[in-house]
Image: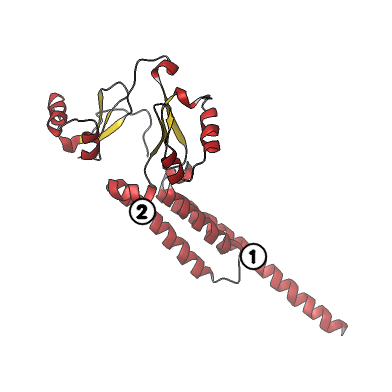
Amino acid sequence: MVKAFSKDQGTEGEHMESHIIEVIIRSFGAYTLLLIINTFLGKQTLSQMTNHDFITAVMMGAIGANLAFDVQVNYWYSFTALVIIGGIGYVTTFLSLKNRGLRKWFSGSPTVLIEDGKILERNLKKQKYNIDSLNQALREKDIFDPQEVKYAVLEPDGHLSVMKKAEASGERKQQFPVELIMDGKIVKRNLESIRLSEECLHQHLRRRKVRLEEVFYCVRGPDGTLAFDFYEDRIDRPVDKEK
């Protein structure tokens, strides 16, 4: 009986040791794979995340954890699932960069919660955002009275952007920034909202001697002027350049 018990103990110890070694190997493998996938997905997954970034990160974290320590789950099943989720995240990010409509669907769009000091209750309800959360977000920006706010916008990543009224900020009267060109394409709905014709926008482009296809981004700023950013920035020696 003693010999049998000792033999069983030895077998159990060998199994435990082999499992520990397997967990170590799987943990290193999971960490390395997540690091590689996250590099491909880009830096946005490290900042405040949009809808598809959050879903991708949560699923990758859960699968990566199982890949690391759950020795009952086949290693290659978890590996395959992790690669697939990472691939889906990469594709959605790529499509979001290429198509504004898909970007709004994947990531959501900004929602105005306060306009000219008035809280828009319908938009609050639509975004499941209560008044306490709104007041807290305003206080974090040193605003204790919503009447001081010209615009408060809930961004797709969940944080609140605020523009104070001119009298509250001590600046001259400001307007809400409106995006007119994105990814080389005119945002016609926004043009209509500020009553600016496409011909007028093209006149601005001709004055700058550029074509629409050369413009990456154009916005009517708070002071009413148009600001342009081009695909070719003509910066010979950028301060910070990705390798």
> Pointer 2: what residue?
92
Query: Where does residue 221 sit, x and y in percent of width and height?
Result: 30, 25
Query: Where does residue 227 sit, x and y in percent of width and height?
Result: 26, 26
Disc with the residue nearer the chain's start (1 vs 2): 1
- Amino acid at pointer 2: Thr
Measure the alpha-carbon separation of dots 1 and 2.
36 Å
Q: Quadrant of the C terminus?
A: top left
Query: Does residue 195 appear in the picture of this structure?
Result: yes
Q: Which residue is at a point 46% across and 24% down the rendered structure image?
A: 147
Q: Which mark is residue 149?
A: none
**Secondary element type, mark 2:** helix
Q: Quadrant of the N terminus?
A: bottom right
Query: Where does residue 106 sit, x and y in percent of width and height?
Result: 37, 51
- Amino acid at pointer 1: Ile
The answer to whether residue 177 is above or below residue 64 is: above
Q: Which residue is at a point 46% across and 54% down the rendered structure image?
A: 55
Q: Is residue 74 left or right of residue 112?
A: right
> Pointer 1: what residue?
21
